[in-house]
Amino acid sequence: MTLAQYKNAIEQSNIVSKTDINGIITFVNDEFCKIFEYSREELIGKNHNIVRHPDVPKEVFKNLWDTILAKKTYKSMVKNLSKYGKTLYVNTTVIPILDNKGFIEEFIAIRYDVTQSIELAKQMQEKDRFLFQQSRLAAMGEMIGNIAHQWRQPLNELGITVYEMKKLFLSNKKPDEFLQSYKHSKDVIKKMSNTIEDFRNFFSPNKQKELFLVKDAVEHLLTMMQGSIYKHALHVEVQDNKGIQLDGYFNEFNQVILNLINNSKDAFNQRKIENRKINITIDADNKNATILYSDNAKGIDENIIDKVFDPYFTTKHSSEGTGLGLYMSEMIIQKSMKGSIKVYNNKSGATFEIKIPLYKEKYNEQ
Ligand SMILES: Nc1ncnc2c1ncn2[C@@H]1O[C@H](COP(=O)(O)OP(=O)(O)O)[C@@H](O)[C@H]1O
Ligand SMILES: [Mg+2]
Protein backbone atom coordinates (compact mmCIF):
# COMPACT_ATOMS: atom_id res chain seq x y z
CA MET A 1 0.00 0.00 0.00
CA THR A 2 1.29 3.42 -0.87
CA LEU A 3 1.08 6.39 1.48
CA ALA A 4 -1.58 7.98 -0.70
CA GLN A 5 -3.65 4.81 -0.54
CA TYR A 6 -3.34 4.78 3.24
CA LYS A 7 -4.47 8.38 3.40
CA ASN A 8 -7.36 7.55 1.16
CA ALA A 9 -8.38 4.54 3.23
CA ILE A 10 -8.35 6.56 6.45
CA GLU A 11 -10.26 9.46 4.93
CA GLN A 12 -12.90 7.18 3.46
CA SER A 13 -13.67 5.44 6.71
CA ASN A 14 -13.09 8.11 9.33
CA ILE A 15 -13.81 11.69 10.22
CA VAL A 16 -10.56 13.57 9.65
CA SER A 17 -9.55 17.11 10.48
CA LYS A 18 -6.34 19.08 10.84
CA THR A 19 -5.63 22.21 12.82
CA ASP A 20 -2.63 24.45 13.29
CA ILE A 21 -0.89 24.65 16.66
CA ASN A 22 -3.54 27.13 17.88
CA GLY A 23 -6.43 24.85 17.07
CA ILE A 24 -7.53 26.69 13.92
CA ILE A 25 -8.99 24.31 11.35
CA THR A 26 -6.89 23.91 8.20
CA PHE A 27 -8.44 20.77 6.75
CA VAL A 28 -11.63 18.72 7.03
CA ASN A 29 -12.66 15.70 4.97
CA ASP A 30 -16.14 15.15 3.49
CA GLU A 31 -17.13 12.86 6.31
CA PHE A 32 -16.40 15.60 8.85
CA CYS A 33 -18.62 18.09 6.99
CA LYS A 34 -21.38 15.54 6.65
CA ILE A 35 -21.45 14.50 10.27
CA PHE A 36 -21.13 17.94 11.80
CA GLU A 37 -23.51 19.46 9.21
CA TYR A 38 -21.22 22.32 8.20
CA SER A 39 -19.92 23.22 4.74
CA ARG A 40 -16.15 23.19 4.28
CA GLU A 41 -16.15 26.99 3.92
CA GLU A 42 -17.84 27.39 7.28
CA LEU A 43 -15.09 25.39 8.97
CA ILE A 44 -11.74 26.32 7.46
CA GLY A 45 -10.14 29.09 9.50
CA LYS A 46 -12.44 28.58 12.47
CA ASN A 47 -11.40 27.34 15.89
CA HIS A 48 -11.89 23.58 16.25
CA ASN A 49 -13.97 24.18 19.38
CA ILE A 50 -16.84 24.95 16.99
CA VAL A 51 -17.93 21.31 17.50
CA ARG A 52 -17.63 21.41 21.30
CA HIS A 53 -20.59 20.18 23.26
CA PRO A 54 -21.60 22.47 26.17
CA ASP A 55 -21.96 19.43 28.46
CA VAL A 56 -18.29 18.59 28.34
CA PRO A 57 -16.40 20.05 31.30
CA LYS A 58 -13.48 22.43 30.69
CA GLU A 59 -11.02 20.04 32.33
CA VAL A 60 -11.48 17.60 29.46
CA PHE A 61 -10.19 20.17 26.98
CA LYS A 62 -7.40 21.17 29.30
CA ASN A 63 -6.37 17.55 29.49
CA LEU A 64 -6.52 17.29 25.67
CA TRP A 65 -4.35 20.35 25.18
CA ASP A 66 -1.91 19.36 27.93
CA THR A 67 -1.49 15.98 26.25
CA ILE A 68 -1.03 17.10 22.65
CA LEU A 69 1.16 20.09 23.52
CA ALA A 70 3.40 17.58 25.33
CA LYS A 71 3.67 15.92 21.89
CA LYS A 72 1.68 12.89 22.98
CA THR A 73 -1.26 11.28 21.23
CA TYR A 74 -4.64 11.92 22.84
CA LYS A 75 -7.31 9.22 22.72
CA SER A 76 -10.79 9.50 24.12
CA MET A 77 -14.50 9.17 23.51
CA VAL A 78 -15.77 12.72 23.08
CA LYS A 79 -19.26 14.18 23.08
CA ASN A 80 -19.57 16.72 20.21
CA LEU A 81 -22.27 18.95 18.80
CA SER A 82 -23.23 19.43 15.14
CA LYS A 83 -24.26 22.74 13.59
CA TYR A 84 -27.95 21.99 14.04
CA GLY A 85 -27.61 20.74 17.61
CA LYS A 86 -27.24 17.00 17.10
CA THR A 87 -25.25 15.28 19.86
CA LEU A 88 -22.52 13.04 18.50
CA TYR A 89 -20.33 10.57 20.34
CA VAL A 90 -17.02 10.08 18.61
CA ASN A 91 -13.97 8.04 19.42
CA THR A 92 -11.28 10.61 18.93
CA THR A 93 -7.54 10.37 18.38
CA VAL A 94 -5.52 13.56 18.13
CA ILE A 95 -1.96 13.18 16.92
CA PRO A 96 0.61 16.00 17.03
CA ILE A 97 2.66 16.12 13.81
CA LEU A 98 6.21 17.25 14.40
CA ASP A 99 8.51 18.98 11.93
CA ASN A 100 12.07 17.79 11.37
CA LYS A 101 13.32 19.91 14.27
CA GLY A 102 10.84 18.24 16.58
CA PHE A 103 8.47 21.20 16.88
CA ILE A 104 4.73 20.74 16.60
CA GLU A 105 3.67 21.59 13.08
CA GLU A 106 0.01 20.74 13.23
CA PHE A 107 -2.52 18.41 14.78
CA ILE A 108 -4.42 15.73 12.98
CA ALA A 109 -7.62 14.40 14.50
CA ILE A 110 -9.17 11.13 13.45
CA ARG A 111 -12.67 10.44 14.71
CA TYR A 112 -14.97 7.51 14.52
CA ASP A 113 -18.70 7.98 15.04
CA VAL A 114 -20.04 5.73 17.81
CA THR A 115 -23.27 7.65 18.46
CA GLN A 116 -25.47 4.75 17.48
CA SER A 117 -23.92 2.23 19.82
CA ILE A 118 -23.86 4.75 22.68
CA GLU A 119 -27.55 5.53 22.12
CA LEU A 120 -28.31 1.84 21.98
CA ALA A 121 -26.46 1.20 25.24
CA LYS A 122 -28.43 4.02 26.84
CA GLN A 123 -31.72 2.57 25.65
CA MET A 124 -30.72 -0.81 27.07
CA GLN A 125 -29.93 0.83 30.40
CA GLU A 126 -33.33 2.51 30.38
CA LYS A 127 -35.00 -0.79 29.67
CA ASP A 128 -33.02 -2.47 32.43
CA ARG A 129 -33.97 0.22 34.89
CA PHE A 130 -37.60 -0.13 33.88
CA LEU A 131 -37.62 -3.89 34.33
CA PHE A 132 -35.84 -3.67 37.67
CA GLN A 133 -38.48 -1.21 38.74
CA GLN A 134 -41.19 -3.58 37.53
CA SER A 135 -39.87 -6.54 39.44
CA ARG A 136 -39.43 -4.38 42.53
CA LEU A 137 -43.02 -3.25 42.24
CA ALA A 138 -44.18 -6.82 41.85
CA ALA A 139 -42.29 -7.79 45.00
CA MET A 140 -43.77 -4.81 46.81
CA GLY A 141 -47.27 -5.75 45.69
CA GLU A 142 -46.76 -9.20 47.15
CA MET A 143 -45.47 -7.58 50.33
CA ILE A 144 -48.54 -5.37 50.69
CA GLY A 145 -50.65 -8.53 50.87
CA ASN A 146 -48.35 -9.63 53.65
CA ILE A 147 -48.80 -6.39 55.57
CA ALA A 148 -52.56 -6.77 55.34
CA HIS A 149 -52.23 -10.27 56.72
CA GLN A 150 -49.95 -9.10 59.52
CA TRP A 151 -52.41 -6.41 60.52
CA ARG A 152 -55.59 -8.41 60.54
CA GLN A 153 -54.99 -10.12 63.86
CA PRO A 154 -53.79 -7.07 65.89
CA LEU A 155 -56.59 -5.00 64.36
CA ASN A 156 -59.15 -7.51 65.62
CA GLU A 157 -57.48 -7.53 68.98
CA LEU A 158 -57.58 -3.76 69.10
CA GLY A 159 -61.27 -3.74 68.25
CA ILE A 160 -62.04 -6.13 71.07
CA THR A 161 -59.89 -4.26 73.57
CA VAL A 162 -61.46 -0.91 72.76
CA TYR A 163 -64.90 -2.45 73.22
CA GLU A 164 -63.86 -3.83 76.60
CA MET A 165 -62.49 -0.45 77.58
CA LYS A 166 -65.83 1.10 76.83
CA LYS A 167 -67.58 -1.44 79.09
CA LEU A 168 -65.03 -0.90 81.86
CA PHE A 169 -65.37 2.86 81.56
CA LEU A 170 -69.16 2.74 81.77
CA SER A 171 -69.16 0.36 84.75
CA ASN A 172 -66.76 2.81 86.40
CA LYS A 173 -65.62 0.12 88.84
CA LYS A 174 -62.37 -1.38 87.65
CA PRO A 175 -59.82 1.37 86.98
CA ASP A 176 -56.94 -1.14 87.15
CA GLU A 177 -58.41 -3.32 84.43
CA PHE A 178 -59.17 -0.26 82.36
CA LEU A 179 -55.54 0.85 82.58
CA GLN A 180 -54.36 -2.65 81.73
CA SER A 181 -56.49 -2.65 78.59
CA TYR A 182 -55.16 0.73 77.71
CA LYS A 183 -51.60 -0.52 78.07
CA HIS A 184 -52.38 -3.58 76.00
CA SER A 185 -53.81 -1.40 73.22
CA LYS A 186 -50.65 0.63 73.17
CA ASP A 187 -48.58 -2.55 72.81
CA VAL A 188 -50.69 -3.76 69.92
CA ILE A 189 -50.40 -0.40 68.17
CA LYS A 190 -46.64 -0.50 68.70
CA LYS A 191 -46.54 -3.94 67.11
CA MET A 192 -48.49 -2.71 64.09
CA SER A 193 -46.21 0.24 63.71
CA ASN A 194 -43.17 -2.07 63.88
CA THR A 195 -44.66 -4.14 61.07
CA ILE A 196 -44.84 -1.09 58.84
CA GLU A 197 -41.30 -0.18 59.78
CA ASP A 198 -40.09 -3.69 58.89
CA PHE A 199 -41.64 -3.48 55.45
CA ARG A 200 -40.31 -0.01 54.88
CA ASN A 201 -36.83 -1.16 55.82
CA PHE A 202 -37.06 -4.17 53.63
CA PHE A 203 -37.04 -2.14 50.46
CA SER A 204 -34.64 0.55 51.51
CA PRO A 205 -31.06 -0.39 50.75
CA ASN A 206 -28.76 -0.97 53.73
CA LYS A 207 -26.26 1.76 54.15
CA GLN A 208 -23.86 -0.15 56.31
CA LYS A 209 -22.65 -3.68 56.57
CA GLU A 210 -23.58 -5.38 59.78
CA LEU A 211 -22.99 -8.66 61.52
CA PHE A 212 -26.14 -10.75 61.59
CA LEU A 213 -27.24 -14.28 62.39
CA VAL A 214 -28.37 -15.92 59.15
CA LYS A 215 -31.12 -17.75 60.97
CA ASP A 216 -32.45 -14.50 62.44
CA ALA A 217 -32.49 -12.90 59.01
CA VAL A 218 -34.42 -15.77 57.48
CA GLU A 219 -36.86 -15.97 60.37
CA HIS A 220 -37.43 -12.25 60.23
CA LEU A 221 -38.27 -12.56 56.55
CA LEU A 222 -40.58 -15.51 57.21
CA THR A 223 -42.45 -13.47 59.81
CA MET A 224 -42.93 -10.71 57.28
CA MET A 225 -44.06 -13.24 54.69
CA GLN A 226 -46.55 -15.01 56.96
CA GLY A 227 -49.38 -13.88 54.71
CA SER A 228 -47.95 -15.47 51.56
CA ILE A 229 -46.74 -18.54 53.41
CA TYR A 230 -50.22 -19.10 54.77
CA LYS A 231 -51.98 -18.29 51.51
CA HIS A 232 -49.87 -20.71 49.47
CA ALA A 233 -49.67 -23.36 52.20
CA LEU A 234 -45.88 -23.41 52.35
CA HIS A 235 -44.10 -25.35 55.07
CA VAL A 236 -40.79 -23.71 55.64
CA GLU A 237 -38.19 -25.19 57.93
CA VAL A 238 -35.00 -23.44 58.93
CA GLN A 239 -32.12 -25.29 60.48
CA ASP A 240 -28.93 -23.92 61.93
CA ASN A 241 -27.08 -25.80 64.65
CA LYS A 242 -24.08 -23.55 64.77
CA GLY A 243 -25.42 -20.02 64.94
CA ILE A 244 -23.76 -18.87 61.74
CA GLN A 245 -23.11 -15.14 61.40
CA LEU A 246 -22.46 -13.13 58.29
CA ASP A 247 -21.06 -9.68 57.79
CA GLY A 248 -23.04 -7.87 55.14
CA TYR A 249 -26.30 -6.35 54.09
CA PHE A 250 -29.18 -7.89 55.96
CA ASN A 251 -31.91 -6.56 53.64
CA GLU A 252 -30.17 -7.59 50.45
CA PHE A 253 -29.59 -11.05 51.81
CA ASN A 254 -33.26 -11.32 52.66
CA GLN A 255 -34.23 -10.20 49.19
CA VAL A 256 -32.35 -13.20 47.82
CA ILE A 257 -34.25 -15.57 50.10
CA LEU A 258 -37.48 -13.79 49.17
CA ASN A 259 -36.76 -14.39 45.47
CA LEU A 260 -36.11 -18.08 46.12
CA ILE A 261 -39.32 -18.48 48.11
CA ASN A 262 -41.34 -16.63 45.47
CA ASN A 263 -39.95 -18.91 42.77
CA SER A 264 -40.79 -22.01 44.78
CA LYS A 265 -44.28 -20.65 45.36
CA ASP A 266 -44.73 -20.14 41.59
CA ALA A 267 -43.47 -23.65 40.85
CA PHE A 268 -45.75 -25.17 43.51
CA ASN A 269 -48.77 -23.36 42.09
CA GLN A 270 -47.93 -24.06 38.48
CA ARG A 271 -47.48 -27.76 39.13
CA LYS A 272 -50.24 -27.99 41.69
CA ILE A 273 -48.03 -29.64 44.30
CA GLU A 274 -49.91 -30.80 47.39
CA ASN A 275 -47.44 -31.12 50.20
CA ARG A 276 -45.28 -28.01 49.83
CA LYS A 277 -41.98 -28.06 51.63
CA ILE A 278 -39.09 -25.66 51.72
CA ASN A 279 -35.98 -26.52 53.71
CA ILE A 280 -33.32 -24.00 54.54
CA THR A 281 -30.18 -25.41 56.12
CA ILE A 282 -27.46 -23.11 57.35
CA ASP A 283 -24.01 -24.49 57.98
CA ALA A 284 -20.36 -23.49 57.72
CA ASP A 285 -16.85 -24.83 57.51
CA ASN A 286 -13.96 -22.66 58.63
CA LYS A 287 -14.11 -20.59 55.45
CA ASN A 288 -17.64 -20.30 54.15
CA ALA A 289 -21.18 -20.23 55.31
CA THR A 290 -23.34 -22.52 53.21
CA ILE A 291 -27.03 -21.94 52.85
CA LEU A 292 -28.84 -24.82 51.23
CA TYR A 293 -32.28 -23.90 50.03
CA SER A 294 -34.42 -26.79 48.76
CA ASP A 295 -38.01 -27.19 47.72
CA ASN A 296 -40.07 -30.14 46.51
CA ALA A 297 -41.63 -28.41 43.50
CA LYS A 298 -40.28 -31.01 41.00
CA GLY A 299 -37.17 -29.08 40.05
CA ILE A 300 -35.92 -27.28 36.99
CA ASP A 301 -35.80 -28.83 33.52
CA GLU A 302 -32.22 -29.87 32.73
CA ASN A 303 -32.49 -28.06 29.37
CA ILE A 304 -32.86 -24.69 31.04
CA ILE A 305 -31.10 -25.10 34.36
CA ASP A 306 -27.95 -23.43 32.99
CA LYS A 307 -29.91 -20.34 32.02
CA VAL A 308 -31.92 -19.53 35.13
CA PHE A 309 -29.45 -16.90 36.37
CA ASP A 310 -29.40 -15.10 33.00
CA PRO A 311 -31.10 -11.71 32.98
CA TYR A 312 -34.60 -11.87 31.49
CA PHE A 313 -34.67 -15.64 31.39
CA THR A 314 -38.11 -16.74 32.46
CA THR A 315 -40.51 -19.60 31.78
CA LYS A 316 -43.42 -17.59 33.12
CA HIS A 317 -45.95 -15.44 31.36
CA SER A 318 -44.75 -11.86 31.05
CA SER A 319 -47.32 -10.69 33.58
CA GLU A 320 -45.87 -13.06 36.16
CA GLY A 321 -42.15 -13.15 35.63
CA THR A 322 -39.45 -10.72 34.55
CA GLY A 323 -36.63 -13.23 34.63
CA LEU A 324 -34.67 -10.89 36.87
CA GLY A 325 -35.19 -12.53 40.25
CA LEU A 326 -32.32 -14.99 40.11
CA TYR A 327 -30.14 -12.58 38.16
CA MET A 328 -30.52 -9.99 40.92
CA SER A 329 -30.00 -12.64 43.56
CA GLU A 330 -26.75 -13.73 41.97
CA MET A 331 -25.64 -10.09 41.74
CA ILE A 332 -26.29 -9.56 45.43
CA ILE A 333 -24.50 -12.75 46.45
CA GLN A 334 -21.49 -12.10 44.19
CA LYS A 335 -21.08 -8.36 44.39
CA SER A 336 -22.34 -7.49 47.86
CA MET A 337 -21.38 -10.63 49.71
CA LYS A 338 -18.43 -11.91 47.65
CA GLY A 339 -20.04 -15.32 47.51
CA SER A 340 -21.51 -17.68 44.95
CA ILE A 341 -24.85 -19.27 44.18
CA LYS A 342 -25.57 -22.37 42.14
CA VAL A 343 -28.52 -24.59 41.47
CA TYR A 344 -29.10 -28.27 40.95
CA ASN A 345 -32.02 -30.65 41.15
CA ASN A 346 -32.55 -32.87 44.15
CA LYS A 347 -34.80 -35.90 44.00
CA SER A 348 -38.01 -33.96 44.53
CA GLY A 349 -37.22 -30.38 43.56
CA ALA A 350 -34.60 -27.68 43.18
CA THR A 351 -31.70 -26.90 45.50
CA PHE A 352 -29.95 -23.55 45.57
CA GLU A 353 -26.55 -23.62 47.20
CA ILE A 354 -25.27 -20.30 48.44
CA LYS A 355 -21.71 -19.97 49.71
CA ILE A 356 -20.55 -16.81 51.44
CA PRO A 357 -17.11 -16.24 52.95
CA LEU A 358 -17.29 -15.93 56.74
CA TYR A 359 -16.57 -12.52 58.13
CA LYS A 360 -13.55 -13.83 60.09
CA GLU A 361 -11.98 -14.97 56.88
CA LYS A 362 -12.37 -11.58 55.23
CA TYR A 363 -11.14 -9.90 58.40
CA ASN A 364 -7.96 -11.99 58.48
CA GLU A 365 -7.14 -11.27 54.88
CA GLN A 366 -6.95 -7.53 55.45
N1 LIG B 1 -37.62 -23.39 42.70
C1 LIG B 1 -37.80 -23.46 41.36
N2 LIG B 1 -38.43 -24.52 40.81
C2 LIG B 1 -38.62 -24.60 39.47
N3 LIG B 1 -38.19 -23.66 38.60
C3 LIG B 1 -37.55 -22.59 39.08
C4 LIG B 1 -37.33 -22.42 40.49
N4 LIG B 1 -36.66 -21.26 40.67
C5 LIG B 1 -36.48 -20.73 39.44
N5 LIG B 1 -37.02 -21.52 38.48
C6 LIG B 1 -36.97 -21.24 37.02
O1 LIG B 1 -36.04 -20.20 36.78
C7 LIG B 1 -36.63 -19.16 36.01
C8 LIG B 1 -35.98 -17.82 36.34
O2 LIG B 1 -36.29 -17.40 37.65
P1 LIG B 1 -36.23 -15.87 38.02
O3 LIG B 1 -34.91 -15.33 37.61
O4 LIG B 1 -36.62 -15.69 39.44
O5 LIG B 1 -37.29 -15.19 37.06
P2 LIG B 1 -38.88 -15.27 37.08
O6 LIG B 1 -39.29 -15.77 38.44
O7 LIG B 1 -39.32 -13.86 36.86
O8 LIG B 1 -39.26 -16.18 35.97
C9 LIG B 1 -38.11 -19.26 36.32
O9 LIG B 1 -38.89 -18.72 35.29
C10 LIG B 1 -38.30 -20.77 36.47
O10 LIG B 1 -38.44 -21.39 35.21
MG1 LIG C 1 -38.52 -15.07 40.28
Image (spheres, rainbow, N blue to C red):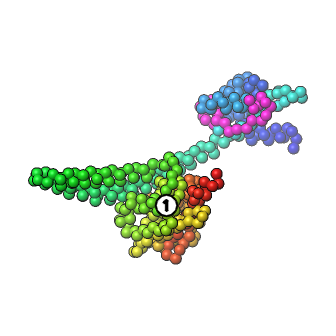
Q: Amino acid at mark 1?
A: Val
Q: Is residue 107 visible?
A: no
Magenta-drawn segment? 66-88
The answer to which of 31 and 116 lies nearer the viewer is 116
Across and down, in percent, residue 335 comes to 58, 53
Query: Which residue occupies 37% across, 62% down?
Result: 226
Left/right of residue 348 with respect to residue 226 in the rendered view: right
Packing grade of label 1 (10 A; few <14, some 14-19, many >=20) is many
Q: Quadrant of residue 229?
A: bottom left
> Does 141 sit left or right of 13 as displayed?
left
Expressed as whole percent of the image width and height from the top left, the position of residue 146 reads: 36, 58
Q: Is 265 rendered above or below residue 13? A: below
Q: Position of residue 252 (x, y in %)?
A: 50, 54
Relative vertical location of residue 139 with respect to residue 29 in this rendering, above or below: below
Q: Is residue 13 left or right of residue 300?
A: right
Residue at position x 65%, y 38% in the image? 89
The residue at which mark 1 appears reads as: 214
The picture places residue 152, in percent across and down from the top left corner, at 28, 58
Location of residue 266 with respect to 159 vertically, above or below: below
Magenta stretch encompasses residue 80: yes
Q: Assign the N terminus to one quadrant of the image.
A: top right
Q: How many labels were placed on the picture?
A: 1
